[in-house]
Amino acid sequence: MEKIIDENKQGEKLILDQKEGNQRKLFIESYGCQMNFSDSEIVASILSENGFNTTQNLEDADLVLVNTCSIRDKAEQTVRKRLEKYNAVKKINPNMKVGVLGCMAERLKSKFLEEEKIVDLVVGPDAYKDLPNLVAEVDEGRNAVNVILSKEETYGDIAPVRLNSNGVTAFVSITRGCDNMCTFCVVPFTRGRERSRDPQSIIEEINDLWSKGFKEVTLLGQNVDSYLWYGGGLKKDFSKASDLQKATAINFSQLLEMCAKAQPKMRFRFSTSNPQDMTLDVIETMAKHNNICNYIHLPVQSGSNRILQEMNRQHTREEYFEMIDNIKRLIPDCAISQDMISGFPTETEQDHQDTLSLMEYVKYDFGFMFAYSERPGTMAERKMEDDVPEDTKKRRLQEIINLQQQHSLYRTEQHLGKVEEVLIEKSSKKSDAHWSGRNSQNTVVVFPKEHYKVGDFVNVKITDCTTATLIGEAVGYSENN
Ligand code: SAH
Ligand code: F3S
């Protein structure tokens, strides 16, 4: 692989891995969750072994791949709009081929070919290793589809090509699929059953990233706390494993500890934690290792016990509070963020008030908040009526967002006057004279550049803040540097 420095549309410098001798050009873009961005790096790696280097220019592409999201209707509409853009480019570049990857590919399957004439290729999340064959079929003028979900595929053996990389932070996926069957969620249908990746291949990828200068890794999965390696296979088949397999199995807190010890100067984060699967030993492992960041994304979706049950979230509001209390007891400065859904079927004004009061209790550092969007094939779509009027959903969502804004400001204010370790990632969007990085709690910190550079761990004194950003001044390198 040869390193090429390029610039993206925002003018940020990017380091691209390109393979010498590759003649064809791949333009790949991703929508939705971090897992999609990570998967696109696997896809780019598979295709780099088959004649394709990536390009930042849609107009130059021989093959355009879009990694899609189905989580809400709006996410799907965004992709459809993007396909219109490809259509326009195809008029200038008629040989360009277009493929869809990810969750919409899995959900719509060959229907995609009928609905969107521009599409030549439909590939689900577990079928990326078949891409070279599928592209060959498309080259011969046929449309190609592979949406088979797998029991084993984790892509543990593929070294991802880093796309859009700042050379400092990277995602490493550790599980695929989800078994939780939250009634609103399409993911179990589009990403299949849950399986974990061989810890050895995870550690190898992390060591490789460190040797290339990366300083922070986020371990990714739909439900990371459910990680369980017992030699391969589905999580739900663990009960059928041999005694030896059971005795030597590795769970998430053990994996986290292995990572923290393998690279003691590297920072580790993880996402996403489902409260029902998060255990005390994960929090204890975080508390024990300085290089595991003090930040947990802990989606709750609703504060009402009745709605939590309708959503098939396997915990109560009280159990959630207990978990929050444990986190704050073991890691007092731990940041916590949420995902919330407003207007789930049957949600009453009282249920909504319960969500607001849960938020008051936790005072999240930040959050991702959505109006309920009915998804085809989910339990909620099949069994419940989408009966909360759109304007009620929107109004409740706004109330949730407003409260989160207040809490975000409250949380950022707690950092004022403190000196915090920041890993520098890039130039600040607003000012070329300032660096932008994040502290352990995942809050963005902006400060004057001075002599520091991207990838440095710097101690920054926090002097000012907004609801989302801390502003400060460097006081020197941190001891981690
Ligand atoms: N694995 C994660 C969630 C993945 S989906 C977890 O443990 O919760 C990311 C977020 O999208 C969810 O947390 C939820 O808040 C939101 N979401 C999922 N399905 C949705 C739907 N049908 N309508 C609105 N928001 C939804
Ligand atoms: Fe979706 Fe629930 Fe899994 S939100 S991704 S089914 S944990």
Image (tube, helix red, strand yellow):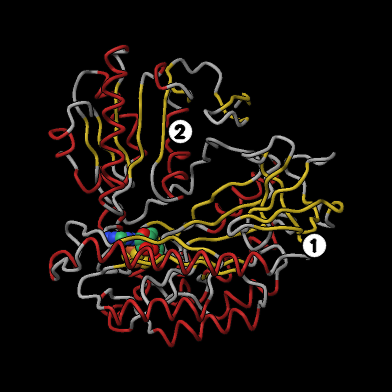
Measured as percent of width and height from the top left, residue 227 is found at 47, 66
Measured as percent of width and height from the top left, residue 352 is found at 33, 76
Give amino acid for label 2: Ala
- Residue placed most toward the observer, 82 or 60: 82
Give amino acid for label 1: Val
Quarter residue 50 falls in: top left
Residue 193 appears in the rendering: no
Whichever of callouts 2 and 1 sits on the residue coming sooner in the sequence is 2
Q: Mark 2 vs ligand 1: CB under 8 Å? A: no
Quarter residue 92 falls in: top left
Measured as percent of width and height from the top left, residue 147 is found at 24, 44
Residue position for label 2: 44
- Residues at marks 2 and 1, CA–CA distance in whole angstroms: 40 Å
Q: Is residue 155 above or below residue 419?
A: above
Which of the two discs, 2 and 1, sits closer to the camera? Answer: 1
Residue position for label 1: 419
- Residue placed most toward the observer, 225 or 82: 82
Measured as percent of width and height from the top left, residue 302 is found at 36, 74
Classify mark 2: helix, strand or loop. Answer: helix
